[in-house]
Each structure stands twice: as structure tokens, then as C-alpha cells.
Image (spheres, grey):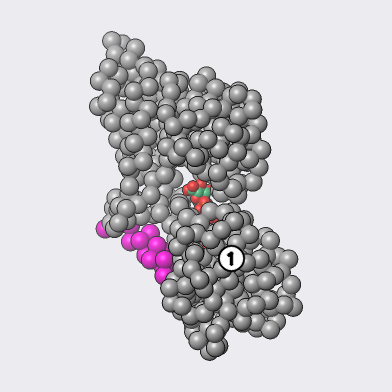
Amino acid sequence: KKVCVVGLGYIGLPTASLLAIKGFDVHGVDVNLHTVELINQGQVHIYEPDLDIMVKAAVQSGQLKVSTEPKEADLFIIAVPTPFQAHQKPDLSYVQQATLAIAPYVRPGNIVILESTSPVGTTEKITDWILEARTDLNISEAVTAVNHRIYVAHCPERVMPGQILRELVENDRIIGGIDGPSTQRTVEFYKQFVSGRILETHARTAEMAKLTENSFRDVNIAFANELSLICDQLDINVWELIRLANHHPRVNILQPGPGVGGHCIAVDPWFLVDAAPEQARLIHTARVVNDYKPGYIVEKIVDRAKRITSPVIACLGLAFKANVDDLRESPALEIVEHLAKLEVGSILVVEPHIQALPERLQLEHVQLKTTEEAIRKADLVVLLVNHDVFYTIDRDALQEKIVIDTRGFFSELSRVRVGV
Ligand code: SAJ
């Protein structure tokens, strides 16, 4: 079987290489020429544990080839970003471009699968876009039309950055076609490489399910973040509080942090708010609570820094969460950028997963340092991301510093300001 995967990012590239290793004839497509060249050399442009090994194996086997243009295939997978524009409106332009790019290559009997997290109704939209571009195709089951029909379904990706390769195979998958035959054929495809359960539904429910999962997590993190603000007021250690409350058999509170980042949880709930603003009140408020957190942390840091002459501030972590290199929608990055603008002191950034600071941080008073050097030189140490590599930090070296711990990472240190 020939599969064409459009979008070779955090979802498309692992999916394309997994399918190639499983023996599918895979053609990967990305608009970025640099990405395409790297992959064709068996290299990767993103960091994800073991992905480099898998891509190399897939390319060397000859089963994975990539280019900037789609090709004819039996099955097309769209895995491009669905960000939002201003005013939290979903931006479907990448999905639309990808759909229009494959449209000339789609043949009767083909399956088109949307994996990108999308607002409700998108799978139906991509069906319309293809049928508008290709009046020779249809989605009718009528005997006279069936020789020209295509199948379209949504199968939302649900993998967690940092464990993508395992979760791609093991997670349960929801598959929602625009109609029964589309669902059935898509299920048959995923059964070939997914060991988790495959759950069938309609495309709209599948779209909503994915948005619901991420909104659920956002609302729960907002609850933890709100507790952290309350605890800060009441001088209570929020990490201890949550640990205690979670001993209740029906309570399971998540962890507060510097805010919610990533391209999914900080984005997807807005698709629901946009679709039903009057109804999605709790989901909207959760977004506001979580987005408030980075600014609150900045205020804390500034308040501490102001008491020191020419303060040196070490910021540990820039990524949106632990053990990834992904800076998209990262609250840590937002905090460091904000601090840099305020020019409260010199900033030493530690992010072991990147080689250079992003352009916006290439400023005279901001430098990328190793953990040891940053901590040694700092007056104030701000833990922003709970990367595993930070576990080796010498706790004694922190005793003389002011520590702001946004993740409860060092919470056993008595001098640490808890609650943020
Ligand atoms: N976070 C907290 N406290 C917590 C948990 C997370 O502050 O207790 C923060 C993280 O630091 C990060 C953000 O939330 O900034 C999101 O991280 P995450 O680990 O919760 O999720 P993602 O964005 O890496 O992946 C999510 C997953 N969705 C769910 O767990 C419901 C993943 O399964 C999805 O595939 C992915 O979104 C996606 O692509 O939509």
C-alpha cells in the first residue's frame, strides 16, 4: 500500500517513519525544503527520543521518501498545524493548503485522513474542498457513483511529546468518518499498526473528542494553578497541599506550573470557545486562568530582583514542558522574554535541549549558559521547566541563592518561595 503523509512535524514524521518500517511505501511531504533535505539524508529537524534512529532506518530501507510535492497514493494523511489567528479564531489555512495540494493526486477509492486537531466540521470541509477541486470524484454510495467515490475520516492524533513513538502504537484511537464506509476503511488501515483499541464514531464527534480531551486537561491544570495563587496568598505550600488532597480516593489534582504551553492544550480549548462562546464558559475561564500565570511569575521575579543591585537571574528551562526541545507557546519562554524586555538584570538561560537562543532572545543581557555556570553566577534562580537533567543540580549550591520554583521541583528546600 502507498501512503502519502502531508506535514512532517511532530506527528507526521513519526507516523511516516513508523508506517515505512511496517512495510508501507511512504511518501512524505513538507513545504519546508530544508526539512525535506534533512530527512532524505536520514536526519531529523525536531527532537523526540529515538525518532532519529527510526527515521534513519526508514529512509535507509527505501520505504520512506520525502519531497515538497505530494504523489499518487492509496491513502493520504494530513498532519499539519492548526494554530489560531488573532482573537482565538482557528486558522485552517495549513489544512486547506494541504488538502488542495493532494487534491490533484486523489483517485477513486482513495482514503483521505485528517490527523490534525481541528475544529468541529473540518473533516466535512476538507471533503468539500476536494470535491470542489475534483468534480470527477464523489462520496456517494449509489451504485452508479461508487466507482468514483473517495473516503474521508478524522483520526485525531493523541500522542504526548516525549513518548510519541510508543504512544503512536499503543494509544487507543478514535476514528470518525464522514460516513460508515469511510470509517470502516480507515479502521482497517489503523488496525495494521495500532495495538490500542480502535473506537468508531462520526467525524464531528471524533473532532470534538480530541478538543474535549485537551480541554479537560486544561481545566484541570487551571484548577491547580488557581490553587497555587490562593496558596501564595495564604502562605501555604501548594505542592504539599495537593499531595495531601490527592490521598482522597476520588481526588486527583494536577500540578501547578508557570502556565500552560505547547501547541495543543493552550490552543485547542479555544476551538470549543469559538464554536460555542455562550456555552463554553468554564473552558474559557480555564484558558484565562492558565494564561495569567506567566505574568504572575514575572511579577514575583521582578519583586525579588528589585531588592538586589545589578541582579543576575538564572532561568532554568525554556521548553514548554519537561524533557522536550519544543518552545512553541512555552510559558517559560514567555516569562524570559518578558523579563528581558523589562531589563531587570542580566539573564542566564539554561536549556540543555537547544543549541542557540531563539532570535527574540538574542540580546546583550541574555545569554545561554550551562546549568553549573548559570547557578554559580546567579543571585536569583528561577526553575521554569522540570527537565530530568536538573535533578543533578547540587542542592547545596542553591542554599545561598534566592530560588523561585514554579514547578515544585526543589520544594523541599526551606528557603524556596513556595506557592508559585
Ligand atoms: N502542565 C502543567 N501541569 C500538569 C500537567 C501539564 O502545568 O500537571 C503543563 C505542561 O508543563 C505544559 C502543558 O501543561 O506546559 C501541556 O503539557 P501536557 O504534558 O499536559 O500535554 P502536551 O501538550 O504535551 O500533550 C497533550 C496531550 N493531551 C492530553 O494529555 C489530554 C496529548 O495526549 C495530546 O496528543 C497532545 O496534547 C496533542 O497533540 O493534542
Q: Secondary structure at mark 1?
A: strand
Residue pictured at 58% horizontal, 79% vertical: 312
- Magenta stretch bounds: 278-294
Kindly tell me whether residue 253 is visible in this rendering: no
Q: In the shown orientation, is residue 120 left or right of residue 221? A: left
Kindly tell me whether residue 49 is visible in this rendering: yes
Compared with 401, 174 (above or below) is: above
Q: Main secondary structure of the magenta part?
A: helix
Q: Quadrant of residue 315?
A: bottom right
Q: Which residue is mark 1?
A: 368
Q: Nearer the viewer, residue 232 or 108?
A: 108
Compared with 96, 46 (above or below) is: below
Residue 347 spot, x, y in % from top left: 55, 73
Q: In the shown orientation, is residue 203 left or right of residue 244? A: left
Residue pictured at 27% horizontal, 17% vertical: 136
Residue 308 spot, x, y in % from top left: 55, 88
